[in-house]
Amino acid sequence: MKLSISWYLVAGATATTTAIPGSDDPLNIPLRHHAVTELPPGSWIENLAVRKNGNLLLTTVLPDASLFEVVDPAGASPTLIRHFTIEQITSLLGIAELTPDRFVVAGGNFSFVAGPAQGSFGLWSIDFNDPSPQPSLLADLPEARLLNGVIAAPEAQDVVLISDSFSNLVWRVNAATREVDIAANLQDATNPGPHSALGINGIKIHDGDLWWTNSTADTGAETNESQRAMYRIKVEKDGSPAPGAQPERMVQFQTPGLDDFVFGPGQNDLKWVATNSGDSIIAVNAEGRKAIVAGGDGSMDLTTTTACQFGRTQRDGRTLYVTTSGVEADGESRGIPSMVQAIDTTGFDF
């Protein structure tokens, strides 16, 4: 998610910035892609997760807080099911699988006019082992300002990590005890300049590091360096920063925004980044080189890319599923549907 609100904080401004790779212009290496499904104009698909059977779960920020499922996305005729809408809130955001077919999703009240409503955010659990899955409130997070990315800590049972884009915190929820605390505070020496907006957005743990995107920061006044970047910090199994660890700015971007991202396919170290209002997917290799693999500024089939995940079946393990929004980052509808696009990454390397 990206907003154009001027007074919020920017994560990672104190990160180590020496030898930043990937600050050059990206290559253009277009990959084949096609539409899988869509929602009507005026909708915003915010995030997705992949079930063990290969189906996709989609969350929506607009027009309401709904969870959809795309059945057989790799097939010839995928179908779309709405499972539920949480009427007490307006928007669903990040979603992640906690245990096989049990998912957690963040939600709260949000509008592009008024912004997020502090005190409205929480974490819900959905169990797809139940034939009629319904949301169950797992924890309230009344101090959260805008929950966004959600992951399950890969080496800590029942631990959920959630980015807070307007506080630049990573919240931690124990799904067994329902205890809530702060795993990481990333707001030191932030740059609340006149054009700064969202900070921390998508989060992932990869090879013992917590990675995140910093969404829409403008150039720092002192360093004259773009802070729209990917960062990492060494963390413990529960998501807490390792003793003495400091954020590192790993890849710098010149796109209008950054959103969620994924590593893959499989154990591959390639990073695939949704650029939100950049209307594209950018691949980043281990050396920090970047390539636009789909879309681009003004793209109508990858407009406002919000998240991406690889398929989990033999048929689509190298297919990158991408969610888009038919709404601009300022809330204006483009008059086009939000979509799920499938990008074939077979054989891709650079």
Image (tube, rainbow, N blue to C red):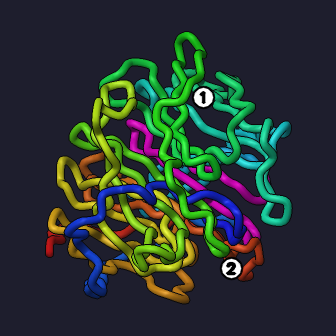
Give the SS element for disc 1: strand
Q: Residue at 53% x, 75% y: name it.
A: 218
Q: Residue at 62% x, 63% y: name it.
A: 192
Q: Quadrant of residue 152?
A: top left
State the image coordinates of residue 221 (x, y, percent, origin top left).
Answer: 51, 76
State the image coordinates of residue 51 (x, y, percent, origin top left).
Answer: 44, 39
Asked if 143 appears above or below 258 in the picture, the reply is: above
Give the SS element for disc 2: loop
> How far apart are the two marked residues, 2 and 1, measured between alpha carbons?
30 Å
Q: How many marks?
A: 2
User: Residue 44: within the magenta?
Assistant: yes
State the image coordinates of residue 237 (x, y, percent, origin top left).
Answer: 31, 26
User: Residue 271: within the magenta?
Assistant: no
Q: Amino acid at mark 1?
A: Ile
Residue 279 visible at all: no
- Kindly give the residue lying farthest to the top in the view shown: 177
Q: Which residue is mark 2?
A: 336
State the image coordinates of residue 347 (x, y, percent, origin top left).
Answer: 15, 69
Residue 265 visible at all: yes
Q: Amino acid at mark 2?
A: Ile
Residue 126's disc number = 1
Q: Quadrant of residue 28?
A: bottom left
Asked if 187 appears above or below 96 in the picture, the reply is: below
In the image, the segment drawn in magenta is 40-64
Q: Residue at 40% x, 44% y: name it.
A: 54
Q: Is residue 317 left or right of residue 101?
A: left
Q: Residue at 74% x, 42% y: name it.
A: 108
- Kindly give the residue lying farthest to the front in the view shown: 222
Asked if 190 appears above or below 304 in the picture, the reply is: above
Residue 219's disc number = none
How many C-alpha atoms fall within 10 Å of the one at disc 2: few (<14), some, or many (≥20)? Answer: some
The disc, 2 or 1, on the residue closer to the chain's N-terminal end is 1
